[in-house]
Amino acid sequence: MRLKLIESMKNQRLTLAEIKGRMNALEDVLQTKEDAQDSRVINLQILKEQFKQLEEQLVQLQPLITNMEAGQAAMASRQVLMKSMALMQSLIMYLSEAAPFL
């Protein structure tokens, strides 16, 4: 692919310096796209870890909530719900940003 691109530029009678400049610019664009994809992968990994933590917290809270009074259980449920909503909102934002690349 790269060779065909260079041959095409050569057929356009570009100088060696111009070909090098264009190839360097292309390399920079490709590297920028790879870096952006790497950061998305990291964000996805962070979201996976947060989901796992949330699941563990829910498992730990279930026995505790059964022994609580109604008001205390409601407060604990609200706190977990808020964390869950924030996590879901992050996931929705991530998916909307990543949709063009999927």
Image: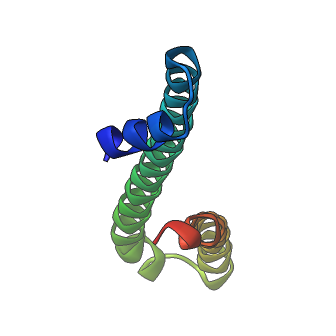
Residue found at the far top of this picture: 17
Q: Residue at x 67, y 74 (%)?
A: 78
Q: Nearer the viewer, residue 7 or 13?
A: 13
Check the image and report above or below for 60 versus 3: below
Colour setting: rainbow
Q: In this rendering, would 88 be left or right of 52? A: right
Q: Nearer the viewer, residue 66 or 97?
A: 97
Q: Nearer the viewer, residue 12 or 53?
A: 12
Quadrant assignment, res 76: bottom right
Q: Position of residue 40 (x, y in %)?
A: 50, 50
Q: Residue at x 66, y 70 (%)?
A: 89
Q: Position of residue 10 (x, y in %)?
A: 46, 34
Q: In this rendering, would 71 be left or right of 40? A: right
Quadrant location of the C terminus?
bottom left
Q: Nearer the viewer, residue 44 or 56?
A: 44
Check the image and report above or below for 52 versus 22: below
Q: Residue at x 66, y 67 (%)?
A: 93
